[in-house]
Image (cartoon, helix red, strand yellow):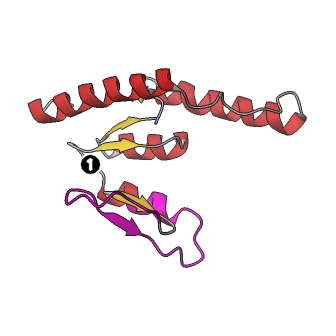
Amino acid sequence: MLVAAQWLRVPPEPWLQLEVVKDGGQLDAADDRIVEIAGPGDIVVTEDILLAGRVLEEGAQVMSPRGRVFTEDSIGEAIATRELMAGLRESGEITGGPAPFGKRDRSEFLQKLDAAVVKVRRGVG
């Protein structure tokens, strides 16, 4: 399932569903919905580190689109790094964003996603 704050074009697959969350004036309505429905046996893909932390608390596996796996052990460091980088961007020390998404990122993501699916099928984590 894909959860978003606005309509997205998704492939016409029977196993894929889009849920558009009306925000009702709430900025994180889509995030809240993801947290509400996520749990053990689910794999959440997000670049949002704060959302990753919330979803981990619900027992889901979490990874970024680049294949970075977030765990209970690593999420604290990821949040701290996020805050540090935000501060550096605000001060003008860093002006660029992440490198463009490339073949290596796609490969890393697919490997980590495959491992997560195997874990879910085995009932681990």
Residue farthest to the right?
92
Amino acid on which the number 1 mark rests in the picture: Gly
Residue at mark 1 = 39
Residue farthest to the bottom?
24
* Residue under the point 25% across and 25% down: 115
Q: Pick whichever, 89 or 118, lies toward us.
A: 118
* Residue under the point 72% across and 30% down: 85
The answer to if 106 sits in the magenta stretch is no
The answer to if 9 sits in the magenta stretch is yes
Dot 1: element: loop
Quarter containing the N terminus: bottom left
Magenta-tinted stretch: 8-33
Residue 31 in the image: state x and y as whole percent: 47, 57
Check the image and report above or below for 42 versus 102: below
Residue 80 in the image: state x and y as whole percent: 62, 29
Check the image and report above or below for 100 versus 17: above
Mark 1 nearby-residue class (10 Å; few <14, some 14–19, many ≥20): some
Q: How many labels does the image show?
A: 1
